[in-house]
Image (cartoon, helix red, strand yellow):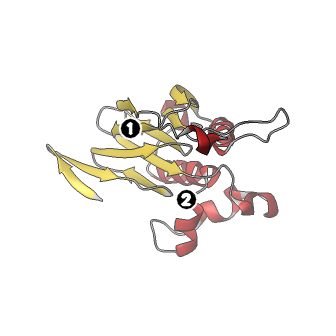
């Protein structure tokens, strides 16, 4: 959804979307177990935000060179249903945003990266041998892929038990974060 906030275009991301802003904009979204990753180049005044639901694209395990050799180099924007589907995955989205910024002449060492979300927003009783939650796996994947792509994280708010609302100003690189209230179910629903 595109709106105007003051003089800046405002973009609202739904889960599984990303936006690369070539002109100053406000990009906002709401995160729970999903992770949002911002990339910002002060020198070029460009920024990007993804809102990814799951940690790893299934093709990453099956393609010889992983995602960086195939899907992440595919067509741009939303010209393909498979591209839109792939943006649900953190590893794909981070590499896709990085590729788009590379094409604009961004130097990866100058990019400021910020990570948000990955919360365990639903109360679940955990057994000692329980598998990690989606939120935890998303946090781990985001950190791993960002580092593997040669970026440094300058700020993060990962994990926890509450959702977040974030607003990313691509003119300044500032991300405003608001913690959402915790949802508590009746006792009978958590057993």
Q: Position of residue 80 (x, y in %)?
A: 52, 74
Q: Outermost residue, left direction?
A: 6
Query: Could you tell me if residue 64 is visible in this image?
Result: no
Residue annotated with mark 2: 87
- Name above or below for residue 104 compared with residue 165: below
Q: Earlier in the sequence, mark 2 or mark 1?
A: 2
Q: Nearer the viewer, residue 32 or 43?
A: 32
Residue annotated with mark 1: 166
Q: Quadrant of the C terminus?
A: top right
User: Image quarter for residue 149?
Assistant: top right
User: Image quarter for residue 166?
Assistant: top left
Which of discs 2 and 1 lies nearer the camera? The answer is 1
- Name above or below for residue 58 compared with residue 27: below
Circle 1: element type: strand
- How many labels, in total? 2
Q: Quadrant of the N terminus?
A: bottom left
* Residue at horizontal 73 percent and vertical 63 percent from the top: 59
Left or right relative to 102: residue 9: left
* Residue at horizontal 64 percent and vertical 50 percent from the top: 91
Q: Badge 1, how many Cα within 10 Å: few under 14, some, many 20+?
A: many
Q: Outermost residue, right direction?
A: 129
Q: Position of residue 9 (x, y in %)?
A: 23, 50
Q: Nearer the viewer, residue 143 or 28?
A: 28
Q: Badge 2, how many Cα within 10 Å: few under 14, some, many 20+?
A: many
Circle 2: element type: loop
């Amino acid at each position: 959804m595109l709106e105007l906030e003051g003089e800046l275009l405002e973009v609202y991301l739904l889960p599984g979307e990303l936006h690369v802003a070539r002109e100053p904009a406000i990009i906002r979204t709401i995160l729970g177990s999903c992770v949002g990753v911002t990339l910002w180049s002060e020198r070029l005044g460009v920024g990007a935000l993804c809102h990814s639901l799951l940690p790893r694209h299934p093709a990453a395990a099956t393609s010889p060179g992983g995602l960086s050799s195939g899907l992440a180099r595919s067509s741009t924007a939303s010209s393909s249903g498979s591209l839109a589907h792939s943006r649900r995955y953190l590893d794909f989205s981070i590499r896709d945003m990085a590729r788009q910024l590379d094409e604009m002449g961004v130097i990866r060492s100058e990019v400021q990266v910020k990570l948000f979300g990955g919360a365990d927003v639903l109360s679940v009783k955990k057994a000692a041998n329980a598998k990690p939650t989606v939120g935890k796996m998303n946090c781990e994947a985001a950190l791993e892929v960002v580092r593997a792509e040669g970026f440094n994280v300058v700020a993060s708010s990962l994990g926890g038990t509450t959702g977040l609302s974030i607003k990313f100003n691509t003119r300044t690189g500032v991300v405003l974060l608001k913690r959402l209230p915790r949802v508590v179910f009746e006792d009978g629903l958590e057993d």
